[in-house]
């Protein structure tokens, strides 16, 4: 069944939610690397363990700071004492790694058996003397990157409150939220600094002990589109002021992001237009490859709207933007920029399909024959065999795509299948399935 909902010109549809995506517990993969003094404990079953082990590839051999607390039959039938078991494990973690924080990741099973993680954590925390943050990043409620959102929302409560002593600053405090590799976070700090905007902190910081100060006078701004719960928690619990801007993905998004933050602080950015222009010029070799090509987002990581908007700016035509979950309020500025970009580039507005149905999407891909489908690994090879170029969507989550300088990396990813298939085109093997299929 499909629901149609129209706001202004963009059309939003909602399908069955029958789609492939990573489980949100995968967020431990990048969060443990980002927060250097943390330890992540995923409390779940073998299913979760298998997923982590396979999805995170070679990382598991690098003694990562995450582990599974694997529930046994005795835990599920309440014959064992959950509290004692978790205490034993956390003490072991304390002894081996001595982290500054242990993050418990709740899973589908802990939800279904109603394990009271939030109730146990404070007690255990005082007993063992290490903060325990609880995030319910389960596959029942969330998709992939939303796992990070649940962890950051839980961490908001642990941020110290801002003390009001600093009248010397040029503008009120600005805290950015979203996990980025340190190099990219520094690049964004520098971009803002060019316009005299100081970033006073990041959520998450690279050490748990350096979490940013939050409070009524602090402005916060997101750098990723999947952080809507964190945004809500920052506003409701810490009374922060949210700057609703497009996300700094692509030169157009980065410029709009800086412009919006500047306007909130009453600063007129200098030389921003020229900076954006220079980046576009440096991308020309890639732009020639993508101009006029069509793309179809099956949708699995919530970055889709921002990426589609950037690709439209590059001259591509987007047929469909599939997306697991669409928070129209948090993404309002991004959606507005998508609309203006379509008008500017004179291309039709793409259909936005929330909770897509992969089966139906495949039918649509067959009909539309896009030049590129951005999709998960489950469909990538089968589509390639049918002559459709594909790009594996998960790479966008792990690649560096934020800010002016990383726009090149996005296009490098997008054009890779196009370049490869161009090179192989002469072999005449674009369709590798039986023709009656
Ligand atoms: S969907 Fe649920 S059961 Fe599956 S890996 Fe994720 S948390 Fe575990």
Image (tube, rainbow, N blue to C red):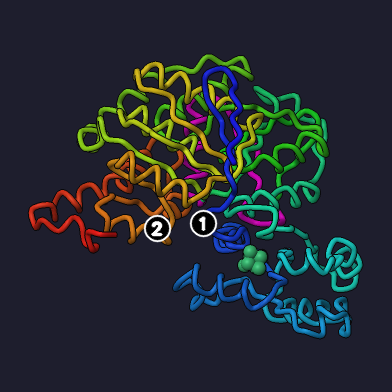
Q: Secondary structure at mark 1?
A: loop
Instruction: Name the residue at 52% across, 44% down.
Output: 185
Ligand 1 occupies quarter: bottom right
Q: Which residue is mark 1?
A: 20
Q: Indicate the position of residue 19 as horizontal and vertical percent values.
A: 53, 53
Depicted 153 relative to depicted 29: above or below? above
Quadrant housing residue 40? bottom right
Spatial separation of the CA atoms under disc 1 and disc 2: 9 Å
The C terminus is located in which quarter? bottom left
Q: Indicate the position of residue 368 as horizontal and vertical percent values.
A: 33, 39
The N terminus is located in which quarter? top right
Residue lying at the far front in this picture: please name it. 436
Residue lying at the far left in this picture: please name it. 426
Depicted 203 relative to depicted 128: above or below? above
How busy is the neighbourhood of tag 2: few (under 14 within 10 Å), some, or many (20 plus)? some
| Nearer-N-terminus badge (1/2) | 1
Q: Which residue is mark 2?
A: 379
Q: Indicate the position of residue 319 as horizontal and vertical percent values.
A: 39, 34
Quadrant housing residue 395? bottom left
Answer whether labels 1 and 2 touch (C-beta < 8 Å).
Answer: yes
Report how many numbered discs are placed on residues in the image: 2
| Along the viewing direction, whichever of 41 and 303 lies nearer the viewer | 303
Please report the bounds of the magenta region as a residue range: 181-210
Depicted 60 relative to depicted 152: above or below? below
Is residue 411 something that shows in the picture? yes
137 drawn magenta: no
| Along the viewing direction, whichever of 294 and 127 lies nearer the viewer | 294
């Amino acid at each position: 069944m499909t629901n149609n909902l129209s706001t202004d010109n963009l059309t939003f549809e909602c399908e069955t939610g029958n789609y492939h995506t990573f489980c949100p517990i995968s967020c431990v993969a990048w969060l443990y690397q980002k927060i250097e003094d943390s330890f992540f404990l995923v409390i779940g079953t073998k299913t979760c363990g298998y997923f982590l082990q396979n999805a995170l590839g070679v990382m598991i051999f690098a003694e990562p700071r995450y582990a599974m607390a694997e529930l046994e039959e005795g835990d599920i039938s309440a014959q064992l004492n959950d509290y004692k078991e978790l205490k034993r494990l956390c003490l072991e973690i304390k002894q081996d790694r001595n982290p500054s924080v242990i993050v418990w990741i709740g899973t589908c099973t802990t939800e279904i058996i109603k394990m009271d993680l939030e109730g146990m954590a404070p007690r255990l925390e005082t007993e063992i003397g290490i903060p325990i943050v609880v995030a319910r990043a389960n596959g029942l409620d969330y998709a992939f990157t939303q796992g990070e959102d649940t962890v950051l929302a839980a961490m908001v409560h642990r941020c110290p409150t801002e003390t009001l002593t600093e009248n010397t600053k040029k503008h009120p405090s600005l805290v950015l939220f979203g996990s980025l590799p340190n190099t990219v976070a520094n690049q964004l700090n520098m971009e803002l600094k060019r316009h005299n905007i100081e970033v006073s902190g990041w959520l998450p910081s690279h050490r748990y002990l350096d979490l940013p100060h939050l409070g009524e006078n602090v402005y916060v701004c997101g750098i990723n589109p999947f952080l809507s719960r964190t945004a809500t928690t920052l506003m409701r619990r810490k009374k922060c002021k949210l700057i609703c801007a497009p996300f700094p993905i692509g030169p157009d998004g980065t410029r709009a992001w800086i412009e919006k933050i500047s306007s909130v602080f009453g600063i007129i950015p200098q030389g921003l237009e020229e900076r954006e222009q220079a980046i576009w010029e440096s991308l020309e070799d890639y732009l020639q490859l993508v101009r006029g090509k069509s793309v179809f987002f099956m949708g699995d990581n919530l970055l889709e709207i921002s990426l589609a908007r950037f690709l439209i700016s590059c001259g591509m035509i987007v047929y469909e933007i599939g997306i697991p979950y669409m928070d129209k309020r948090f993404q309002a500025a991004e959606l507005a920029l998508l609309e203006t970009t379509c008008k500017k580039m004179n291309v039709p507005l793409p259909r936005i399909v929330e909770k897509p149905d992969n089966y139906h999407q495949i039918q649509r891909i067959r009909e539309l024959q896009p030049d590129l489908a951005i999709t998960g690994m489950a469909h990538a090879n089968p589509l390639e065999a049918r002559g459709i170029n594909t790009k594996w969507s998960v790479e966008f989550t792990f690649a560096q795509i934020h800010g002016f300088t990383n726009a090149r990396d996005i296009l490098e990813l997008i054009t890779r299948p196009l370049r490869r298939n161009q090179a192989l085109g002469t072999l005449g093997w674009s369709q590798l399935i039986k023709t009656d299929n």
